[in-house]
Every structure is written in C-alpha cells, then in structure tokens.
Image (tube, helix red, strand yellow):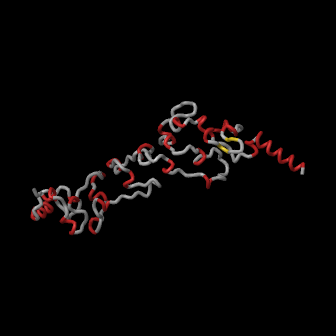
Amino acid sequence: MALITANLLGLVALAFVYPHLMISPGPLVTAHRELATDCFACHAPLRGAAPERCTRCHALPDIGLSTTKGLAIPLRSVKTSFHQELIEQDCMACHSDHQGPKLAQRSRKTFSHLLLRATVRERCEGCHRAPVDNLHRQISGNCAQCHSQNGWKPATFDHARLFLLDRDHNAACVTCHTNNDYSRYTCYGCHEHTPDKMRKKHIKEGIRNFENCVECHRSASKEHGDEGSREARGND
C-alpha cells in the first residue's frame, strides 16, 4: 500500500512539474507554442483554464483589432471584432488552444448570436461586410427580412408580400427586373402587357394614373384588380 501511495504521489508531483508532458491533450496552436512548457500561463491549478488569464495577454478592447504586441491586425485577415459585445467572458466556451483530440467537443459551444448583447444582435453590418452582388447592392436596411441569425442560407424572401407569383406571373426574375436592378420592376416584360394595350384598358376604366402597377394589382387574380388608392385611379 505504501508503494502504491508513493507512486500516486509521484505521479501527482510529476503532473505539476511537467504538466505539458503528463496531462497535455495535445500541442498548442502555433501562436501559443512559446507557452508549451508554461501550462499555468493559462491554467489555474485544479481549476482548469481561466478566462482572466487569457485577458492578461488578450486585452478585451484589442481582440480582433491588434495583436498582443500592439500591432494592428489587417482588416483582410479578420471579419471584424465582436468579442467586446459578448454577454460573458468565457473564452473556453468557443476556443481550445490544444490541437489534440477534442475530448470536450460536446461541451464546447459553436458561435451563437445569443452570446451577443441584445442591443447589437440586429446590427448585422457591425460584424458582417455587406454583399456586393447586384441584388444586395439595391437593398439596405433590415437583413432579417430575408436572413435569419441561425445561418446565412437558406434565405427567405416573401415576394407575395409585394406581388404574388402565381399562374402566368411565375416568371424568371429578369422578366420583371431588367439589367439586374432589383430595386425597380416593369410589367412590360412579356407580350401580354404592352404600354399601349395597358393604357387603353385603364383609360376605358377611367383610370388615368397607372404607373405603379402593384399599387392596385398584387397578383394575377382579377379580384385584386379593383384594389388601390384614389390617387392611383386618378380620382380627385
């Protein structure tokens, strides 16, 4: 029994003297390799890694903006800094500096927007660069009208809120939105609707102003053709 006790004490002592050899889960990431033999730079004895030890080197206001040596981080290498807006400082919830087997993977969180303060969750542009494709260049405002915070894709856009794409109107986008300009539309993209034909039909009904088609017509249904404001019908 004394021998077993001695061996156990010896192992415990070795774990404190050479923790990087006795209990390390794997090599450190390249940026922290100089700490390979200094486990207590990040770990508190018998308590594991402690966030306050991370912030000794990584000052919260500088994370994502400058290195621990004070050098600015080029914008092209990072999206932006959002760590300053987290509701809790629990670095290990998302990060592991060891590259060995991910034994605690189940306990590690993936990033969630719920980790951010409520006041900044809807400010997408604070962390994300705006897309520069032809569609998104025409759009400004609330990203949530098409995207959710669970993922960029799939995106949803309720076209029916503006115009219902039913029956003959279930057409390709370029039929109504020409030149990749989604901020505008035309109803003269098909052979059924020509300016002269539409003008005659509306004048016959006593409608003099019909520039904004969707103000009265929200779908191909005839029932919707009677909707609209007095201004749209040219009434005084």
Q: Which quadrant does the C terminus fall into?
A: bottom left
Question: Residue 36 placed where, x, y %?
Answer: 69, 39
Going 67% across and 51% down the picture, which residue do you hit?
101
Q: Nearer the viewer, residue 82 or 156?
A: 82
Is 14 on the left-hand or right-hand side of 148? right
Number of numbered discs visible in the structure rendering: 0
Q: Is residue 24 above or below residue 60?
A: below
When asked about the image quadrant of residue 46, the answer is top right
Q: Quick one: which residue is furthest to the right in this view?
A: 2
Q: Nearer the viewer, residue 164 or 12?
A: 12
Question: Residue 187 placed where, x, y %?
Answer: 22, 59
Do we see residue 188 in this rendering?
A: no
Is 87 on the left-hand or right-hand side of 168? right
Is 8 on the left-hand or right-hand side of 129? right
When asked about the image quadrant of residue 154, the answer is bottom left
Question: Residue 198 placed where, x, y %?
Answer: 15, 62
Question: Residue 35 placed where, x, y %?
Answer: 67, 37
Going 58% across and 45% down the picture, which residue do you hit?
90
Do we see residue 98 in this rendering?
A: yes
Going 69% across and 38% down the picture, which residue do you hit?
40
